[in-house]
Amino acid sequence: MWPWEHAIVGYLAYSLFCHTVYRDSPGGLEAFAVVFASVLPDLIDKPLAWEYGIFDSGYALGHSIFFAVALSLFVGIVAHSLGRPRTGLAFGLGYLLHLPSDVVDAYVREGVYQPELMFWPVETTGSHGHSRNFLEQFFQLFSQYQAELLAGDLSTYMWIQIGMASSAALLWLYDGAPVLREVLVGSFRFVRTLVSPETPTETPSERK
């Protein structure tokens, strides 16, 4: 599954969870946490495997359920101690959803059931024989993905993904465009302070 597909799944799941449980939309920090966590396993494993050869494949430490649970608990505890329990929950949900999503994606795309993707180091997927560096490997795989989209003859699975992407975009707008909203508000406040800085008010004693 591509990183943006993981991000879509993660945001959809967390936003729907927030609306169901909290009757509220995700905040900016929560939205950032769930999206970042949803792509983090690939950010860990793919460069270490393709660029540095530390792992035999792009499914290793970052995709391990043992590491995922430990990291999610750690982040959750830290977030709770900082008064941000929902941010910790968003991170854990985004990260943990990544693992079964890869298993489902491999089964639907290739007809291969690989639960071992989640059980490194107890189970490994073996070497995929990548001879290119990270960027070369990424662009090679992306060109295949792009060719499938441009061919026009999309599979049912691709149409489902397009539908999910559209739903995530509409839900994000309904939620008030979190992250972008905070960036715009922060930028506006910063520009306003530069354009019209507040002048300190003089006290009667200072006027004498």
Image (cartoon, grey):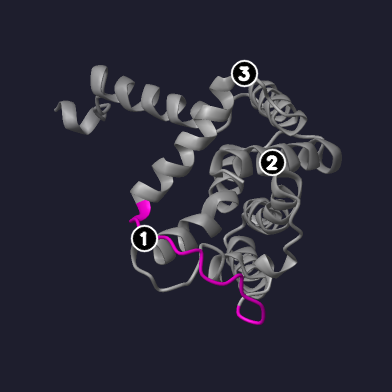
**Residue occupying image coordinates x 60% and y 60%:** 79
Q: Is residue 122 magenta?
A: yes
- Give residue 131's mark: 1
Magenta stretch, residue numbers: 121-134
Label 2 neighbour load within 10 Å: few <14, some 14-19, many 20+: many
Amino acid type at mark 2:
Val
* Discs 2/1, front: 1
In this view, the residue in front, 98 or 129, is 129
Residue picked out by circle 2: 9
In the image: residue 182, left or right of residue 133: right
Residue picked out by circle 3: 152
User: Marks 1 and 3, Cα distance to the nearest angstrom?
Assistant: 31 Å
Quadrant housing residue 130: bottom left
First-in-chain label (2 vs 1): 2
Residue furthest to the left: 208
Vertical order, 157 against 111 (above or below): above
Q: Under tag 1, what secondary structure?
A: loop
**Residue occupying image coordinates x 40% and y 61%:** 50
Amino acid type at mark 3:
Gly
**Residue occupying image coordinates x 62% and y 46%:** 1
**Residue occupying image coordinates x 70% and y 48%:** 110
In this view, the residue in front, 140 or 36, is 140
In the image: residue 44, left or right of residue 92: left
First-in-chain label (2 vs 3): 2
| Residue 204 in picture, x, y percent from top left | 25, 28
Q: Under tag 2, what secondary structure?
A: helix
Amino acid type at mark 1:
Ser
Label pair 2/3, CB-CB below 8 angstroms: no
